[in-house]
Image (cartoon, rainbow, N blue to C red):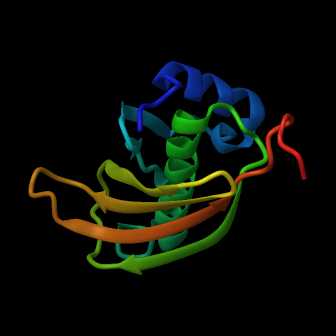
Amino acid sequence: MQPIMTMEEIHDFLDREFPQIHMDGRVLTITDVRPGGLTMRLDPEERHLRPGATISGPSMVMLADVAAYAAILAHIGPVALAVTTSLNVNFLRKPKLSPLFCNCSILKLGRRLAVIDTILTQDSSGEAVAQATATYSIPPRQNEVQ
């Protein structure tokens, strides 16, 4: 499955439709859009930390959710009302205070549901710090009969 939106188009869409994700400064950046997937980077700041100088669980969940949504957009186009219906996260290792990458792979992209697998990594070792599976509900298109 080929993407139909570029990184720039997805960034523009997110900036326009969801400006709140950058309210305290831009920390999320798409670094790669590819057939069946996408990679997004989180540059953590103080607000993303928890005691022990590690990236917080809620920050990792946010990255997985936004990245999975962006992967869907890349392949179906700008659909603001696609919504998360399920997100299951497995925290595997303590992440350091350094950039976090979320590599998304689309497992299923149907007319009504999309399922995305995400792997969060930090360094060149490629060891996962977390894994999440996200399911999204895709609203019917204007020309589809209910």
Residue found 35% across the figure and 75% down from its top: 52
Between 77 and 9, the residue placed more toward the observer is 77
Q: How many marks?
A: 0
**Which percent across, then down, holds residue 118?**
39, 60
Rendered image quadrant of residue 65: bottom right
**Which percent across, then down, holds residue 23?**
69, 39
Question: Quarter holding the N terminus?
Answer: top left
Question: Where is 82 relative to 134, above or below?
Answer: above
**Of all residues shown, which one is farthest toward the left?**
125
Residue found 67% across the figure and 28% down from its top: 13
Question: Where is 115 relative to 1, above or below?
Answer: below
Residue found 66% across the figure and 44% down from its top: 21
**Which percent across, then down, holds residue 93?**
26, 76
Residue found 63% across the figure and 31% down from its top: 77
Question: Where is 84 relative to 82, above or below?
Answer: below
| Horizontal side of residue 118 vs 70, given as left or right | left
